[in-house]
Image: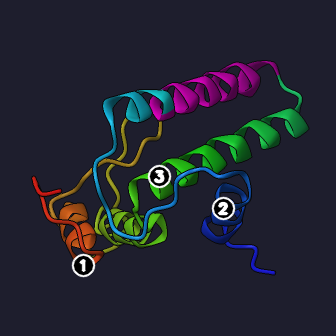
């Protein structure tokens, strides 16, 4: 059995009759709102537990966020692994060729002069998405 989050969540969606699309597409406003509410609920739980703990609950809530995010991607027909790879490619350009990294006072890594924005639309087009089309 695969341990890929995408494969695991797909297995769950198929087992319980939740939507799984193979091509990126918009969904009904009601379904989109529902998925947004699920994500917000999970993110709020992470925010709470990250301060109050304990660590095992934080790990659980973080996993729930990932699980719901992958589920939302499946509902929309998005190969989230490919999107994450593109975000990673982009994030790696925040580091300059000399290895220099710009940071905000709180440690957040900033976009430097060599930063290349992610082409998420291009990733989705390669998955079969037609912008504005249904």
Q: Quadrant of residue 131?
A: bottom left
Q: Distance between the residues labelled 1 and 3?
A: 18 Å
Q: Nearer the viewer, mark 2 or mark 1?
A: 2
Q: Where is residue 46 in the image (x, y as percent from the top left)?
A: 67, 29
Q: Distance between the residues labelled 2 and 1?
A: 24 Å
Circle 3 Cα neighbour tier, 10 Å, few/some/many (<14 / 14–19 / ≥20) = many
Q: Are the residues at dot 2 and dot 1 in contact (C-beta closer than 8 Å)?
A: no
Q: Distance between the residues labelled 3 and 2?
A: 11 Å
* Residue at (31, 47) in percent of width and height: 110
Query: Residue tagged by mark 2?
Result: 14
Quadrant location, the N terminus:
bottom right
Q: Counting residues from the N terminus, which is met first, the one under dot 3 or under dot 2?
A: 2
Residue range (magenta) = 35-52
* Residue at (89, 39) in percent of width and height: 56
The vertical placement of 24 against 106, above or below, is: below
Q: Counting residues from the N terminus, which is met first, the one under dot 1 or under dot 3?
A: 3
Is residue 47 among what the camera can see?
A: yes
Does 40 appear in magenta? yes
Query: Residue tagged by mark 1?
Result: 126
Does 61 appear in magenta? no
Query: Residue tagged by mark 3?
Result: 75
Quadrant location, the C terminus:
bottom left
Q: Nearer the viewer, residue 46 or 2?
A: 2
Q: Position of residue 58 (x, y in %)?
A: 79, 35
Q: Which of marks 3 and 2 is in front?
A: 2
Callout 1: helix, strand or loop? helix
Q: Counting residues from the N terminus, which is met first, the one under dot 2 or under dot 1?
A: 2
Left or right: 103 as drawn, with respect to 57: left
């Amino acid at each position: 059995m695969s341990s890929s989050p995408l494969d695991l969540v797909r297995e769950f969606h198929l087992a319980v009759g939740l939507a799984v699309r193979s091509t990126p597409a918009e969904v009904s406003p009601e379904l989109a709102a529902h998925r947004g509410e699920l994500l917000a609920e999970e993110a709020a739980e992470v925010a709470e537990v990250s301060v109050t703990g304990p660590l095992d609950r934080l790990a659980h809530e973080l996993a729930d966020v990932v699980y719901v995010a992958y589920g939302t991607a499946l509902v929309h027909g998005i190969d989230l692994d490919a999107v994450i790879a593109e975000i990673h490619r982009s994030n790696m350009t925040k580091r300059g060729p000399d290895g220099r990294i710009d940071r905000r006072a709180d440690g957040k890594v900033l976009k430097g002069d060599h930063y290349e924005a992610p082409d998420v639309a291009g990733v989705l087009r390669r998955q079969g998405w037609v912008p504005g089309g249904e």
